[in-house]
Image: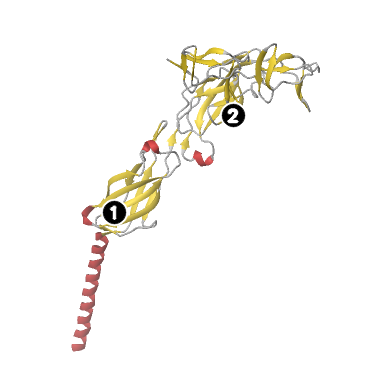
Amino acid sequence: MVKGFRIKGLASIMLAGVFCFCAAVPVLAAGTVRSLNLRFEDQYELGVIVEPEITCVSAGISIDSVTWEKDTDQWKPGKKVTAVIEVSSDGGREFLSSYGAESCKISGARLTSAKGDGDTAIIKASYYPVVQLDSPEEAGWSAENPQKAVWKKADHATAYGIRLYRDGYLVRNITATGTSKDLSEYMTKEGSYYYEIRSMAKDDSDRKYMKSSEYLTSSGKLLDDMGDTEGRWRTYTDGKKYEGADGEVVKDQWYKIMNQWYYFDENGTAATGWRQIDGIWYRMDPEGVMLTGWQKVDGVWYYLNPDGSMAVGWIMDSPGQWYYLNSDGSMAADTVIDGCRLDPSGLWVE
């Protein structure tokens, strides 16, 4: 009987110990936040980068504040920004002193650090902004070159997609950077042209953070006098020459080819650079194309009229904007001409 009592007593003591242990486990689990789970959801507003929506999906955890290292107007698509998130626990539970990637999971961003201090914790995460691109505001054609598409820059866009049409039929899909594109190599036939343009990302690395815009349709451009489109160029040691469709080399004249003007001397060589013709100065590019508009040559600005002739004297480049070209064609600047003051850019200021 004594022996049985001892065994029974020992069993009672062990059972009591188990109860005490089991009772201690829930207390520890309830009192400590062992894992965190946050979600960053991208938000889109046309042409503008906006903050993501941040939520905590861990039960009993609240987000108290979110601060960013930069204001959103300084954000760029795909360029890392850091969020500092302060969270607190419900019911007085305490956070661990630190959390790693396994115990603090973040979707839509990358964990930088997570540290607890009592019933609050600070989480830092790296976020990569996204944007829904807006279409360019305007799409038209250059006044100097009727085959050059021009448009206004769209915020955050790194490239533009162009669909060129002739008489309603698609001619070519083209990708461009900047705010203009010479389309003359695709506009080789007479007809009515227009293009559609959208803002987009330049490459795959940008494409992850940018959504392309809708297409914007340009104004139309009628090409009804392209000049010669049937001949061919030949290159010689003394320069380029052009053979018409009849096989004859064009000589000693102005000649229009693919809607561009060229001047060929008595030997049939296309003029380049400055050339005085019938007492008037003109300038051609290295390919022989006659230039118009403002041209900077050896650090000096010149203005070439729509017919290619070098301007001298007063010109009004755009409404209300006057400039003065010296007798050698160079633009006057930071001086007084005829009692009119010209600023360092050459513009007449009253």
Q: Which residue is mark 1?
A: 121
Q: Quadrant of the N terminus?
A: bottom left
**Which of the 4 image quadrants contains residue 33?**
bottom left
Q: Nearer the viewer, residue 292 or 256?
A: 292
Q: Residues within 10 Å of mark 1 (few under 14, many from 20)?
A: many
Seen from the viewer's position, the closer of residues 227 and 289 is 289
Is residue 189 shown left or right of residue 178? right
Q: Which mark is residue 171?
A: none
Q: Secondary structure at mark 1?
A: strand
Up-down relation of residue 8 to residue 37 (above or below) = below
Residue 255, percent across and down?
71, 15
Q: Residue at x 58, y 27 (%)?
A: 299
Mark toward the start of the polypeptide (1 vs 2): 1
Query: In the rendered view, does 119 fall on the left or right side of 289?
Result: left
**Is any atom of residue 87 visible in this view?**
yes
Q: Residue 248: x, y in percent?
A: 81, 16
Residue 200 percent location from the top left of the image:
50, 33
Task: Report which quarter residue 172 is drawn in.
Answer: top right
Quadrant where the image shows the C terminus = top left
Q: Secondary structure at mark 2?
A: strand
Using a 10 Å C-alpha cutoff, classify the residue at mark 2 as few (fewer than 14 neighbours), some (14 to 19) or many (20 or more). Answer: some
The residue singled out by tag 2 in the image is 174
In the picture, measured across the screen, residue 186 lies left or right of residue 28, that is right
Query: Residue at 28% across / 45% down in the picture?
Result: 65
| Cα distance in 3D space between marks 1 and 2 | 51 Å
Amino acid at dot 1 = Ala
